[in-house]
């Protein structure tokens, strides 16, 4: 029976992760001022706007941060975690569930950036068309994170700024998300 629960948990994680990716991408695209003429930006806008438009009436943007997209992504993590607790037959504490879903959202964004920076760095080693929509979107999302270190960590022809940013992101996962998840899980389980 635990194999079946693991399979259902994986499917829930996959489904909610895919939908959360759309809203996290929308959040990051607006924060990084990604080119709206990019077909991927238009795809994100088209498929997230029906959900975000009503929420934005109540919760407007703060500076360049789309608070509605942030709220929807957090709610998706909350529902995902609640469903996973329901699968194992546990009723979690509300405060713990809220904190645990916040930790999962932060972790999701950190892992998203880790993967994005890795793929973007890998693609920069090859001759690819810089006008390609995926590469333009990835470059627009990665550039604000790498900009503070750009050109300061160059040895020969290699720029180590992506590597340093990836190390910082991994440390943030260990030092920020790990403790938040532990506290949230203890609170959720009532311990």
Image (cartoon, rainbow, N blue to C red):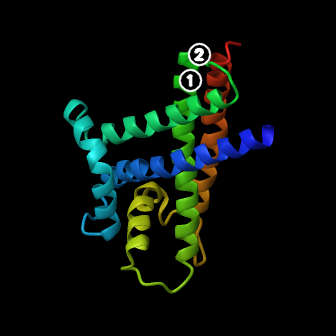
> In the drawing, does residue 101 fall left or right of residue 6?
left
Tag of residue 34: none
Residue 161 visible in the snapshot: no
Which quadrant does the C terminus fall into? top right
Q: Give the residue at x 53% y 53%.
A: 112
Which quadrant does the N terminus fall into? top right
Residue 146 screen position, x and y as percent: 47, 59
Residue 101 screen position, x and y as percent: 54, 31
Q: Give the residue at x 52% y 69%.
A: 120
The answer to whether the residue labelled 2 contacts the one labelled 1, judged by CB atoms less than 8 Å apart, is yes
Q: Residue furthest top?
A: 190
Tag of residue 93: 2
Secondary structure state at the residue bearing disc 1: helix
Residue 39 visible in the snapshot: yes
Quarter residue 130 falls in: bottom left
> In the drawing, does residue 168 fall left or right of residue 56?
right
Q: Residue furthest left?
A: 57
> In the drawing, does residue 92 fall left or right of residue 131?
right
Q: Residues within 10 Å of mark 1 (few under 14, many from 20)?
A: many
Residue 169 screen position, x and y as percent: 59, 48
Q: Give the residue at x 61% y 23%.
A: 184
Relative vertical location of residue 159 with respect to residue 32 in this rendering, above or below? below
Which residue is the site of mark 1? 97
Residue 52 screen position, x and y as percent: 28, 42
Q: Give the residue at x 24% y 69%.
A: 37
Q: Residues within 10 Å of mark 2 (few under 14, many from 20)?
A: some
């Amino acid at each position: 029976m635990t194999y079946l629960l693991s399979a259902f948990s994986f499917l829930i994680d996959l489904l909610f992760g895919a939908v959360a990716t759309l809203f996290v991408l929308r959040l990051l695209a607006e924060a990084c001022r990604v080119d709206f003429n990019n077909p991927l930006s238009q795809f994100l806008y088209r498929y997230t706007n029906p959900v975000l438009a009503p929420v934005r009436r109540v919760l407007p943007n703060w500076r360049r941060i789309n608070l509605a997209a942030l709220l929807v992504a957090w709610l998706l993590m909350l529902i995902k975690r609640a469903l996973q607790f329901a699968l194992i037959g546990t009723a979690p504490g509300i405060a713990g569930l809220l904190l645990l879903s916040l930790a999962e959202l932060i972790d999701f964004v950190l892992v998203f950036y880790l993967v994005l920076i890795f793929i973007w760095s890998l693609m920069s080693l090859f001759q690819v068309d810089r006008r390609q929509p995926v590469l333009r979107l990835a470059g627009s999302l990665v550039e604000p994170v790498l900009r503070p270190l750009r050109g300061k960590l160059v040895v020969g022809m290699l720029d180590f700024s992506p590597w340093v940013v990836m190390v910082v992101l991994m440390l943030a996962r260990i030092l920020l998300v790990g403790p938040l998840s532990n506290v949230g899980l203890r609170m959720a389980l009532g311990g």
